[in-house]
Amino acid sequence: MLIARAEKEITDFLAGFCGKRIGFVPTMGALHEGHLSLIEQSRAQCDITVCSIFINPTQFTNASDLEKYPVTTQEDIEKLQAAHCDLLFLPSTEVIYPNGFAIKEPYLLGTLENVLEGAFRPGHFQGVAQVVDRLLQIVRPTCLLMGEKDWQQTRVINKMLLGHTTYPTPTLVIGPTIRAASGLAKSSRNLRIPAELLPDAAALYHSLQQINSRIHEENPKDLIEAAKHQLLAAGFEKVEYIAVVEADTLEEKENFYEGDRLRILGAAWYFGIRLIDNISVTI
Ligand code: PAF
């Protein structure tokens, strides 16, 4: 696996694969099975697989969250080598933001950036769009692979790609959420929860499943309220939101019709860590 830090190293390497399918998995490191499954999916669909590790300052609304973000670069390199990734892009902040952090014009993300995660992390999705846009300008992949666990992020990037023309638009491929046996979604932030408490953190996932199992019979508002109470009783410190939404627009839904594509999303704090999860619902 080649490790590249400069933009030119990436473009020189990829110039040798003209006409080949390039799969790209952007990450912030602290790699887990979710990331590795995206690498595997890229290898199955593409000729060359590129992964980036860059902890993007512009998507953190809280400076201490950025400081505490886990950094495990050596282990990440070993995992990527074992997964047969072809190229790791490890850029510095100067390579990604040569002209500073300011965005010339905000990305047109519509309501997607203000609801759910966006309501609790103002500016977060502008930062995500900014860094993914910049990475795509450099890597110019055929396929962009992202995890279903960050569902709202996939919708935001989908919207950004629809409005974009400065590089060939990659196909957005969404890989399934990978879960521990307890049901807890794999996440880099889980590294900050003591191992013995990890199974209990799966209560967020179970609460979403419970809503899903009763959504045909009961009012979603009541189900959501009950789920919030259960999580607090199970030791969660705070539930920021649980919502049943249309899968693409993320509009909250109370009435459903056959064929509707819905998602249930939630964010809650456990052991001082903010966890998010989501599942799909088929009506
Ligand atoms: O999902 C993440 O790890 C990040 O938001 C991403 C897409 C790598 C952008 O920094």
Image (cartoon, rainbow, N blue to C red):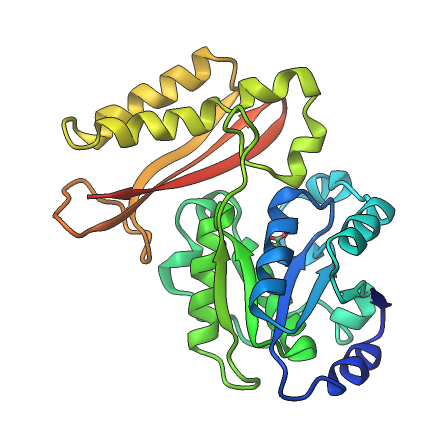
Residue 224 appearing in the image: no
Quarter placement of the N terminus:
bottom right
Does residue 217 sit above or below 143 in this rendering?
above
Question: Which quadrant of the frame does ligand 1 lie within?
Answer: bottom right
Quarter of the view holding residue 41? bottom right
Does residue 227 sit above or below 111 in this rendering?
above
**Could you tell me which residue is drawn at 27 percent across and 47 percent down?**
262
Q: Is 259 displayed left or right of 237 in the figure?
A: left
Q: How many labels does the image show?
A: 0
Does residue 144 sit above or below 213 in this rendering?
below
Quarter of the view holding residue 271? top right
x and y percentages locating residue 184 in the rendered image: 53, 29
Does residue 269 sit above or below 25 in this rendering?
above
Q: Is 261 displayed left or right of 150 in the figure?
A: left
x and y percentages locating residue 72 in the rendered image: 82, 44
x and y percentages locating residue 180 in the rendered image: 57, 30
**Could you tell me which residue is drawn at 65 percent across and 74 percent down?**
47
Residue 223 appearing in the image: yes
| Residue situated in front as seen by the camera: 264 or 74 | 74
Quarter placement of the C terminus:
top left
| Residue situated in front as seen by the camera: 184 or 112 | 184
**Could you tell me which residue is drawn at 49 percent across and 42 percent down?**
120
